Each structure stands twice: as C-alpha cells, then as structure tokens.
Amino acid sequence: MSRSRIKLGIFVLIATTALTGCSDLYLDRRESISVSAGEDVYSNQVAQMVDPWPPASANKNIAFDGQKMQSAVERYRTNKVTTPVGAMTSSAGYQAAPTTTKP
C-alpha cells in the first residue's frame, strides 16, 4: 500500500470517530424527560375536553324542502335520476368549442 492510501485510511478513521460524537443516539437514551415533552400539555387539553365541537354544530333545525327531497329519493329508488343542467365548477360561461365543417 502506498503512503497516501494509509494516510487517507487514517484520516477517514479519525473523521468517523470524531463525527460519531455528534450523534443524537445519546440524547435518545438518556433518563429524563424527552425533548418533545412540551407538546403533551396541548394533547392532554384536547383529550380532556368535554365537547370539542362548536356550539353551532348541535343545531338540528336544518332548513330543507321536504317535497324536493322526497322526489329526489323516489327518483333515486326508481333509477330515474336526472342529469344536472349546467353543472359546472366555474361561474364563467364556458361553451363547447364550435366545430367547423368544410363544404
């Protein structure tokens, strides 16, 4: 082996030994409170909450049109569902591109 390869091997050995000291494995195995212990307070607050839903979610008086709902259910049962007219995701009036035919 040449001297340069031996020097390179020794340098790599020293560098890896020095860098293993920077490992966080020591912090994972210490006998104390974990680094992320501060977040437990918020998780405990949510776990002990009596009713986490907003008050408006308890409103069971929802406005609806019974006749319209009944006719929709009946169309669904008889498999006569009507396709929506003009059901687009945008309010812009997109139209199909005109097809031109040459005479």
Image (spheres, helix red, strand yellow):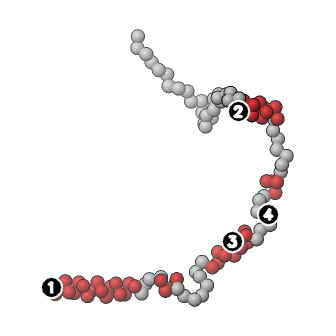
Disc 2 or disc 1, which is closer to the eye? 2
N-term mark: 3 or 1: 1
Q: Name the residue under label 1.
A: 1
Give the structural element (helix, strand or loop) at label 2: helix
- Residue that appears at 41% across and 10% down: 103
Give the structural element (helix, strand or loop) at label 3: helix
**Residue type, label 2:** Tyr
N-term mark: 3 or 2: 3
Toward the viewer: 77 or 64? Answer: 77
Q: Distance between the residues labelled 1 and 4?
A: 74 Å
Return the x and y of residue 22 as percentages of the image width and height: 43, 84
| Residue placed furthest toward the top | 103
Q: Mark 3 points at which residue?
A: 43
The vertical placement of 17 against 61, above or below, is below
Q: Name the residue under label 4.
A: 51
The vertical placement of 31 against 79, above or below, is below
Q: Name the residue under label 2.
A: 76
Evaluate whether residue 89 shows in this view: yes
